[in-house]
Amino acid sequence: MKTLALIVPCFNEADVLGMFYTETTRVLDSIKDEYSAELVFVDDGSRDDTLKIVKELAATDSHVKFISFSRNFGKEAAMLAGMEYAVKADYIGILDADLQHSPDLIPKMLHYVDKEGYDVAAANREDREGESKFKSFLSDSFYKVINKVSETKITESAQDFRIMKRAVVKSIISMPENIRFSKGIFSWVGFNVKWIGHTNRERAAGETKWSITKLAKYAVDGILGFTTTPLRFSFIFAFLCAVTAGVSFIYAVIRNIIEPAYSGTVPFLLTGMFIIAFLLLLCIGILGEYLARVYTEAKDRPKYIISQSNTQVVYSLSDDE
Ligand code: UDP
Ligand code: MG
């Protein structure tokens, strides 16, 4: 019997977990002759009854596992903890708790990884149901920028909703970075991906956990995590400064030759100084951003801390296939 582990990151999802469990187990029941499935709930420091509900489910269903964080570490950390636990399964899936990722797609995804030789079957969002125009615009702009500056191409509509073979998950969890941007990591590790069109449903209950500030941070993490191009901006600015300095010098010399009594250079000097100060500050800011990241990585803090769990997170890179 092949094993499947489905990771479900949950942050304050008490309103929807019951529905999620009913719908997902119905799908898993339909494939139980071929796959023995586990549901791995990762409670990302929820402040509502999420953990209580998950524990109740675990008490009645031995296929339910849970990992609960000591505080909110973010969806990236939740997915990582889930993968570090679930890597022992043959197939590892990730789906949101809010039923926006339709569990009905699971058998189809399994078919591609198990029968068609793909390493990953991932959902590709076909429309923007339930997303504001403003959010769509920001998201479009973000993917345009990241795909311009980064060597790792990131499919705009690619979702975290996916089923992967163990080898893929092993390589994902072997990436040591602390500031994790899964969309980039999924794409960076490569492998043979089958994209499956998927229309996001409306959230079944509760509300989105992504504020504009959380999304902005996510976008910056994504760009700085997957490219060093911004570091090169300093060279471009340095070049522009040199050109400007050259032109103003020539201007001053010529003007002084033609017009010996001329003494109106002060405004130009001031403008020049401000331009230089602005550029220097900008470059220092960019360096600072990277320095902050080096600092964070160098500290090498745990990516999450589990306060309680009914299972053990065991992970070793040297584990056999
Ligand atoms: N999530 C999480 N930690 C967070 C934010 C979200 O584990 O800090 C989970 C959340 O419970 C859900 C999934 O990540 O299962 C996607 O979140 P959400 O539905 O709020 O995002 P959206 O669909 O609005 O992009
Ligand atoms: Mg959602």
Image: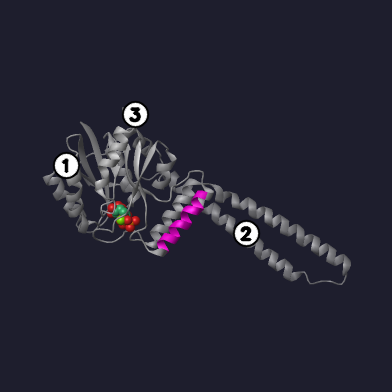
Choose the circle earlier in sequence order: 1 or 2.
1
Mark 1 close to ligand 1, CB under 8 Å: no
- Residue found at x 21% / y 52%: 20
Q: Give the range drawn in magenta.
A: 134-147
Question: Picture coordinates of residue 218 (x, y %)?
Answer: 41, 54
Q: Name the residue under label 1.
A: 29
Q: Which sits in the foreground, 293 or 14? A: 14
Q: Is residue 68 visible?
A: no
Q: Mark 3 points at which residue?
A: 318
Question: Picture coordinates of residue 314 (x, y %)?
Answer: 27, 36
Determine which of the numbered discs, if any, sits on residue 138 in the image. Answer: none
Residue 217 sits in quarter: bottom left
Look at the picture and state if 297 lies above or below 255: above
Question: Picture coordinates of residue 83 (x, y %)?
Answer: 31, 41
- Residue found at x 47% / y 53%: 143
Q: What residue type is labelled 1?
A: Asp
Q: What residue type is labelled 2?
A: Leu
Dots 2, 3 in contact, CB < 8 A: no
Q: Tell me if residue 34 is in the magenta stretch.
A: no
Q: Name the residue under label 2.
A: 279
Question: Picture coordinates of residue 243 (x, y %)?
Answer: 72, 56
